[in-house]
Image (tube, grey):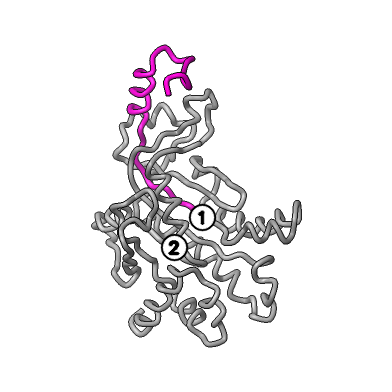
């Protein structure tokens, strides 16, 4: 391992620098569903044009001038919003890319819901006939995953690439894992982010806004102790739409986690 960092004076110094550079905060990942099918069927550069709406809706709620710590992955967006628990000296040293106006967990949650609702408003007018056989190649739903934690490092700061955001760490990894189990149109968040929401005494999380999805330990690959995530209950018009007999294919084509969520939505439909 030390040979990989032969240019550094001391490997132990490098590990110390990593520890001192550790960041705490919220990771947000928006992902376009089944984008690989889109790329295979439409080819390059045809599929690129379908990213425009995906990108514009996210940029509307997370504008570049305010949300500097981001990574655009083509069919996904990764955001990092530092916590106020970070040492001020560390954030000051990274002020060129620092989130200048810290956001509460509730504000972050509201922005992510805004993105999902905006995309739903765009999705809803598509009739079953219009989507038809082209659903898997022309129209994309999105997912959102949110996690909160530490052990986050901006790797680019060790590569002399000032102003570039390139996050690595366990919280980033777990957010990607949570995203991998999200179904189309779903917003999932970790228990650690839920704790942040519950700590907001001025605007606490309403239990009608979410429910818990449990699964056997080990299902969240790489995080053997995690046995649940939390599902944001969408707007009632979205719920009514996906439960409509005319939208049966939305359930038939969904991933297993999404099916479970929709069954739960059916059980709660009268109270949502």
Q: Is residue 253 magenta?
A: no
Give the quarter of the image for residue 269.
Answer: bottom left
How far across and down, in percent of the image, does residue 64 sit? 55, 45
Q: Residues within 10 Å of mark 2 (few under 14, many from 20)?
A: many
How far across and down, in percent of the image, does residue 119 sit? 56, 65
Whether residue 196 is visible, yes or no, is: no
Q: Is residue 10 magenta?
A: yes
Residue placed at 63% from the left, 57% from the top?
36
Residue placed at 33% from the left, 28% from the top?
19
- Residue 30 numbered tag: 1
CA distance for labels 2 and 1: 9 Å
Closer to the camera in the image, 56 or 131 = 131
Look at the picture and state if 210 lies above or below 129. Answer: above
Residue placed at 57% from the left, 65% from the top?
141
Q: Residues within 10 Å of mark 1 (few under 14, many from 20)?
A: many
As helix, strand or loop, the secondary structure at mark 1 comes to strand
Give the quarter of the image for residue 123.
Answer: bottom right
Q: Is residue 10 left or right of residue 121?
A: left
How far across and down, in percent of the image, does residue 248 sit? 54, 82
Q: State the residue lying farthest toward the top.
A: 9
Closer to the camera in the image, 132 or 107 = 132
In magenta, the rendered stretch is: 1-30
Closer to the camera in the image, 36 or 150 = 36
Which residue is disc 2 drawn over?
A: 187
- Residue 93 numbered tag: none
As helix, strand or loop, the secondary structure at mark 2 comes to strand
Closer to the camera in the image, 106 or 245 = 245
Look at the picture and state if 150 lies above or below 249. Answer: above
Query: If the image is split into quadrants, where does the N terminus sit?
Result: top left
């Amino acid at each position: 391992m030390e040979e990989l960092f032969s240019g550094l004076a001391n490997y132990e110094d490098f590990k110390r620098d990593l520890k001192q550079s550790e960041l705490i905060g919220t990771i947000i990942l928006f992902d376009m569903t089944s984008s690989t099918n889109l790329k295979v069927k439409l080819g390059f550069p045809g599929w690129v044009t379908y990213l425009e709406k995906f990108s514009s809706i996210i940029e509307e709620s997370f504008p570049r001038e305010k949300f500097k710590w981001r990574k655009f992955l083509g069919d996904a967006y990764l955001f990092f919003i530092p916590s106020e628990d970070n040492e001020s000296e560390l954030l000051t040293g990274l002020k060129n890319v620092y989130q200048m106006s810290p956001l509460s967990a509730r504000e972050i949650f509201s922005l992510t819901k805004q993105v999902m609702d905006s995309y739903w408003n765009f999705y809803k007018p598509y009739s079953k006939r219009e989507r038809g056989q082209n659903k898997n190649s022309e129209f994309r739903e999105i997912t959102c995953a949110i996690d909160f934690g530490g052990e986050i490092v901006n790797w680019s700061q060790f590569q002399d690439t000032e102003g570039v955001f390139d996050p690595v760490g366990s919280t980033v990894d777990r957010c990607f894992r949570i995203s991998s189990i999200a179904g189309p149109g779903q917003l999932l968040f970790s228990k650690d982010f839920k704790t942040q929401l519950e700590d907001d005494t001025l605007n606490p999380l309403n239990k009608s806004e979410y429910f818990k999805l449990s699964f056997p330990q080990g299902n969240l690959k790489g995080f053997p102790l995690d046995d649940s995530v939390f599902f944001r209950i969408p707007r009632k018009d979205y719920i009514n739409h996906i439960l409509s007999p005319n939208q049966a294919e939305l359930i038939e084509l969904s991933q297993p986690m999404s099916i479970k969520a929709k069954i739960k939505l059916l059980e709660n439909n009268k109270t949502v």
